[in-house]
Amino acid sequence: MSLENRLAIAIKKEAEKLICRYHEYHNNTHAEFLRNKKRLGDSAPPKSIKKPNYWNIDKKFNPFYVRRKHKNIAKSIAKNIKLRTYNPNKPFIKEVPKHDGGKRNVTIYQIPDAAVSKLFFNRLLSKNKHRFSSFSYAYRNDRNVHFAIQDISVDLKNSERIFIAEFDFSDFFGSISHNYLFDQFGKNGFFISPEERFIIRAFLKDRKVGIPQGTSISLFLANLTCWSFDQKLEKEGVKFSRYADDTIAWSPEYSKICNSFLLINEFSKEAGIRINITKSDGINLLSKPNLHSEISSKKSLNFLGYTLSVDRVSIKNKSVDKIKKQISYILYRNLIQPLKKPSLAGQKIPANDKDENFLTAMMQIRRYLYGGLSKKHINDYLSGRINRIFFKGIMSFYPLVDDTDQLKELDGWLLSVIYRSLQLRAKLLATWSFNRYHIFPFNQSRGELLKRCGEEKIYGKYLLEIPSFLLIHQALKKGLIEKGIEKIMNPRSLGYDY
């Protein structure tokens, strides 16, 4: 297939991906508007459908235009690549907030340029991925975030105590030395054609240092930059896990961990990438709880949304807080917010043991946790009555968690926050002269609420059942054993903000 045809396919595919994403946003916004209208009546905020502001900068940011013209665009770009006159158009720089309060610049290229970047990324990866270290997990189609977590946890569980080195780089993508990067092209057995070298340099042309964050070809360059560093760690005899610039190394031998830190410093100077001192924990001893240690020690480490210790894998506290915040918001939006408006116009007041707002909240929480599954679906899967289910809820981003104590605590918290929200809702209803303390669900104790919600049928289905973190974990565990990580992890795992 000619370069022009491959580009046409890639450009059309990239445009259709963005069109699909825009339609999903449009439909979700409309559905949210209808929910707000039903919940809040005339005080509901108006529906506002927005387009990305950079669509107005150039038509080639607009996927609808690009899809119509994809063949002509591909023909022009293919010609320019052959003549070595191709230059990506000026990208849009978007500021994205970081967890630590700072901001990260993400480069958004016009759709045809993004397609060129992805096409050449896939070409480079397909013929070079075997050269990358097996301990490098990011930006590959044969490795992913969950493989990294599994490999680390298996090693840690085989050790009562182990030395670990944790480090993080400052502005990894934006700091890579071009001299260091280009020097790697002719080393280490990588296959990079003259045409691919031209494309790489075209995307880096207006930069004196660093590679753009937000385009596919940079993902290959990031792993290429770290190749020599990865090899040195392997030769040192330490185990390590690197996901982009997030790296940890571990060994039962303190001297090897110290040497690995020297290698980190050496790589930092050669590649021009500074170590982030504030986010790097340095060297520690990881040991089982209550086990005496003679040097600075810790019981767990955080990596890619998980908390890892020598005996369990848990959801990181920051990720737990995000989950709790989302569930609390669902409850507030459905049960509390409508009763804090100046008027109850349009509101359906609970009566005859029925509360439509409570039903909506429980269905939304269950969808968030289970991804469209029901307790019956999950129990049928666990018992073998059905052979396959699709995991799409929030827990499918954490399939390797085995900390059942944490999951039981989350189940207890979920029941508690639902109960407290209902009590507050009853109190707010009373302020509007609607005494509902005597009807379901407001007349239930905490334990009675769990049982009654699991028994109550609506339209012949158990739509009020309170979901369980532990139950979906058991289904995920069975799926891991029978199907493997890639079959049960959320399909958006690679792009999830851990």
Image (cartoon, helix red, strand yellow):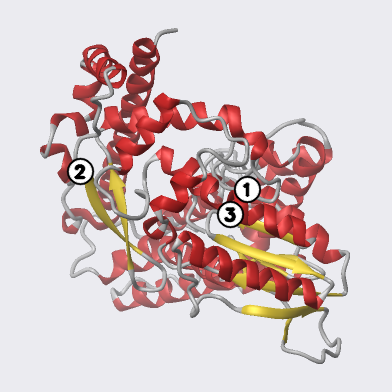
Secondary structure beneath label 3: strand
Q: Are marks 3 and 1 in contact (CB under 8 Å)?
A: yes
**Does label 2 or label 3 sit earlier along the sequence?**
2
Secondary structure beneath label 2: loop
Q: Amino acid at mark 3?
A: Tyr
**Residue 329, position in %: x, y?**
41, 64
**Residue 45, position in %: x, y?**
18, 55
Left of 312 or right of it: where is 141? left
Q: Amino acid at mark 1?
A: Tyr
Q: Residue at x 36, y 54 (%)?
A: 210
Quarter of the image for residue 43 reads: bottom left
Please tell me which residue lies in front, 65 or 3: 3
Please tell me which residue lies in front, 156 or 39: 156
Spatial separation of the CA atoms under disc 2 and disc 3: 30 Å
Secondary structure beneath label 1: loop
Q: Residue at x 50, y 39 (%)?
A: 185
**Residue 57, position in %: x, y?**
11, 39
Q: Nearer the viewer, mark 1 or mark 2?
A: 1
Left of 302 or right of it: where is 257? right
Residue found at the very far top of the displayed protein:
1
Q: Amino acid at mark 2?
A: Pro
Q: Residue at x 81, y 79 (%)?
A: 287
Crowd around label 1: few <14 · some 14–19 · many ≥20 (10 Å): many
What mark, if any, has residue 243 been given in the picture?
3
What mark, if any, has residue 137 been given in the picture?
1
**Residue 26, position in %: x, y?**
27, 37
Q: Which residue is mark 2?
A: 52
Please tell me which residue lies in front, 269 or 17: 269
**Does label 3 or label 1 sit earlier along the sequence?**
1
